[in-house]
Image (cartoon, helix red, strand yellow):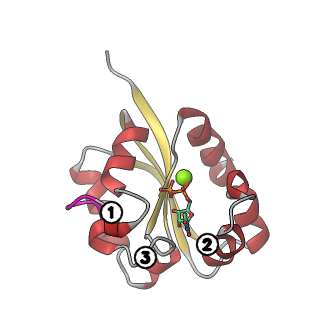
Amino acid sequence: MSSIEQTLSIIKPDAVERKLTEKIKEKFLENKLTIKNQKKIQISKEEAAEFYKVHQTKPFYDRLCSYLSSGPIVVMILEGEKAITLNRKIMGATDPKKADDGTIRKEFGISIDKNSVHGSDSTGNAKKEIEFFFK
Ligand code: UDP
Ligand code: MG
């Protein structure tokens, strides 16, 4: 049974700054995801705080929100068969040190906070996150 999904991807400030946008997009395309919509923007710390609200009790929350709003980001809607799980696989583990070979975070991530990409983790969050940036 086919299950075409959409998921939200963000190329984070560390990767945009290092001009890795095209290389990262290539990873999605070569893994059969298509980019349905994309824009380069910079968000405020307040917007980052809203976006990452699920993490508001975590010790890294304030740093995370400052970081995501620190420079331009590229937000994209990715679409494809099981896109949510597939994107998470292409991204690799949160900590680049633990990410599998060939993943974006392994190849491009600098540290657990500067890990180059965000990807939705569930159907519900994908819908919310796409609406956050594109509605
Ligand atoms: N993060 C961090 N320190 C941590 C855990 C997470 O700075 O100890 C940051 C990291 O940038 C990560 C984001 O918070 O991408 C969201 O964390 P999550 O656990 O949702 O990881 P992800 O879904 O991005 O793999
Ligand atoms: Mg997450």
Residue 63 placed where, x, y %? 66, 76
Horizontally, residue 126 falls left or right of residue 119, namely right
Check the image and name the residue furthest to the top: 1
Q: Which residues are magenta?
A: 100-104
Q: Looking at mark 3, is its residue's CB closer than 8 Å to ligand 1?
A: no
Establish if 80 lies above or below 129.
above
Q: Which mark is residue 68?
A: 2
Return the mark for residue 98. Answer: 1
Q: Quadrant of residue 91?
A: bottom left
Earlier residue among tags 2 and 3: 2
User: Quick one: SS at disc 1?
Assistant: helix
Q: Quadrant of residue 123?
A: top right
Q: Residue at x 74, y 73 (%)?
A: 45
Mark 2, mark 3: which one is toward the viewer?
Answer: 3
- Which SS class for mark 2? helix
Residue 24 visible in the picture: no
Which quarter shows the N terminus?
top left
Asked whether mark 2 lies closer than 8 Å to ligand 1, one says no
Q: Judge whether residue 29 can be spotted in this image.
A: yes
Dot 3 lies on which element? loop
Q: Which residue is mark 3?
A: 111
* Residue 102 colored in magenta in the image: yes
Observer-nearest of 52 and 82: 52
Residue 14 coordinates in the image, percent (x, y): 47, 79
Camera-near label (1 vs 3) is 1
The three-letter code of the residue at mark 1 reads Lys
Query: For the stretch drawn in magenta, what is the main secondary structure?
Result: loop
Residue drawn 60% across and 41% down?
125
Ligand 1, by image quadrant, is bottom right
Alpha carbon distance from label 1 to label 2: 22 Å
Left or right: residue 49 versus residue 118 is right
Pick the front one: 44 or 125 = 125
